[in-house]
Image (tube, rainbow, N blue to C red):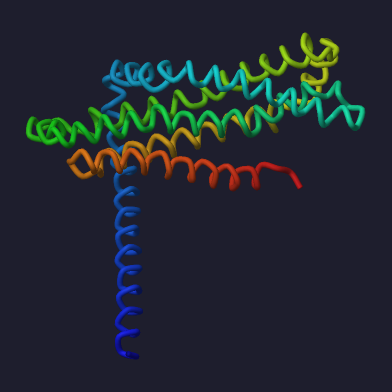
Amino acid sequence: MFSGLLTKVANVLRGIGHKLVDQLWRFGGAVRFSGYVLLYSGESFRRLHLTIREIYFTGVMSLIIILVSAFFVGMVLALQGYNTLQKYGSSEAIGVLVALSLVRELGPVVTALLFAGRAGTAITAEIGLMKATEQLSAMEMMAVSPIARVVAPRFWAGVISMPLLAALFSMVGVLGGYLVAVPLIGVDNGAFWSQMQANVDFREDIVNGVIKSVVFGVACTMIALFEGFDAPPTAEGVSRATTRTVVNSSLAVLALDFIMTSFMINP
């Protein structure tokens, strides 16, 4: 009985060890893959039309869900913020609350989560299917680098698109908050905009938000590309890679947001 218990414990530990080693191999492969993407980026810039096409695919095609989500997020922020600020006699500061919440946190974070759910999964599925149908292998046989032709343009398209989408998210969110706070609730129009202008700092708020959105763009796009490139060439493998893209991108965005916020906030 005791020997059987030891065998079960050994099997559990062996399974944990195998999973840990597999994850370390995948992490090393991801780092190596990222290095190759940066190495072949120069070749992708020579074919600028490929990057522009991918910007349209990842950025422009994501505009609808980004703008609609931003509009409703801004309206909800205005409603919840007014309900809280009114208790302390600071309802005129609703514009500051909406703007700072969007520019500092919700704009970059929610945009990255939506980007991972829409564009990230599409990138993973597309590259995974190209691998399953041996299109990437055919490129290698024709002496065409799949990373330079397929991966690098999509990477830079995601990095460029994310800050622009986050900026549009914040702008539309502020508009949604304004429509709820001023015409609907009755907050003074001048106080809404003047307090926002006086309290939103360009360096501490806007620049930090842009830095976050760029980092999120790098993380989400690289995860989507690696999962698609590393996916097993089967329908089940591609579907699992797409699921991992959403999960890993969401966790990476939230973890990176905490790390960057801890460095950006002045004590």
Q: Position of residue 242 (x, y in %)?
A: 33, 38
Q: Position of residue 7 (x, y in %)?
A: 29, 82
What residue is at 54 percent from the left and 47 percent from the top? Answer: 255
Extreme residue toward the left, this view: 141
| Residue 193 can be seen in this image | no
Vertical order, 219 against 60 (above or below): below
Is 158 placed left or right of 199 in the picture?
Answer: left
User: Which of 135/10 is in front?
Assistant: 10
Place residue 18 in its image quadrant.
Answer: bottom left
Vertical order, 72 against 141 (above or below): above
Is 131 placed left or right of 16 in the picture?
Answer: left
Q: Quadrant of the N terminus?
A: bottom left
What residue is at 16 percent from the left and 34 percent from the top? Answer: 136
What residue is at 60 percent from the left and 28 percent from the top? Answer: 107
Total marks shown come to: 0
Extreme residue toward the right, this view: 89
User: Which of 164/181 is in front?
Assistant: 181
User: Which of 211/222 is in front?
Assistant: 222
Is 150 placed left or right of 76 in the picture?
Answer: left
Place residue 185 in its image quadrant.
Answer: top right
Place residue 83 in its image quadrant.
Answer: top right
What residue is at 69 percent from the left and 30 percent from the top? Answer: 101
| Residue 69 can be seen in this image | yes
Is 200 placed left or right of 34 in the picture?
Answer: right
Q: Position of residue 256 (x, y in %)?
A: 54, 44
